[in-house]
Image (cartoon, rainbow, N blue to C red):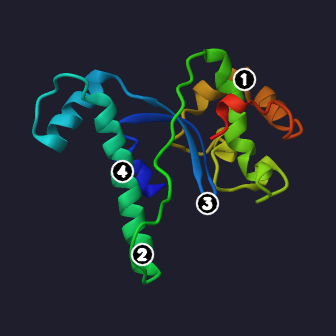
Amino acid sequence: MERYQKYIQPVATCFAFALLPNHFHFLIKIKDENVLQPLYKVATGKNTNGDWQPGFVIKQWSHLLNSYAKSFNSVYHRKGALFIDAIRRIAVNQESDLCNVAFYIHKNPVHHGFCKKISDWKWSSYNSIISQKPTLIERTTVLEWFGGTDRFIFYHNQPVELKTTTAFEI
């Protein structure tokens, strides 16, 4: 998450995440062009022109993954690639789908058998969203999607098998 904060937080707003032993999920919104332009200029020394935003944001993810792989390889005395697949991303175009996507992300550790309950997985945004502690997650926005903390918890207490949508399978 420190690498996320360094590389991704400047370019995206995070609404939900889950870090698992073999993959991760983030629900993010790329920040507005007026926020990204100065970052792009500092990072590249170039002015923005054309379709620069997607490549710039992907480059930030690349920096995060490369940094993590180098650190992991150093700690475990290994060499070579750490990640098999490239980043896969899915656009969420309907505001009504945001609750389902957040639930999908939070249920993923249960779905893959890493824990029994969503609230048991400490490497997701679920507990950050229901707590009052400071967080990098856009807690207020997420809770508004669900209609408040109680409804967020109720929605997430459904059986994990519910609301499985193949459109969000990655």
Q: Which mark is residue 73?
A: 2
Left or right of residue 121, residue 23 in this image: left
Farthest right residue in view: 159
The answer to whether the residue labelled 1 contacts the one labelled 4, judged by CB atoms less than 8 Å apart, is: no
Q: Which mark is residue 24?
A: none
Left or right of residue 63, residue 140 in this image: right
Nearest to the observer: residue 156 or residue 93: 93
Circle 4: residue type: Ser
Q: Give the Cα separation between the discs numbered 2 and 3.
A: 16 Å
Residue drawn 18% across and 43% down? 43
Relative vertical location of residue 24 with respect to residue 92 in this rendering, above or below: below
Residue drawn 26% across and 22% down? 34
How crowded is the residue under tag 1: few (<14 C-alpha within 10 Å), some, or many (20+)?
some
Q: Which mark is residue 146?
A: 1
**Nearest-to-viewer mark from 1 and 2:** 2
How crowded is the residue under tag 4: few (<14 C-alpha within 10 Å), some, or many (20+)?
some
How crowded is the residue under tag 3: few (<14 C-alpha within 10 Å), some, or many (20+)?
few
Residue drawn 50% across and 59% down? 84
Mark 2 or 3, nearer chain start? 3
Q: Give the Cα separation between the discs numbered 1 and 4.
A: 32 Å
The answer to whether the residue labelled 4 contacts the one labelled 3, judged by CB atoms less than 8 Å apart, is: no
SS at badge 4: helix
Circle 3: residue type: Asn
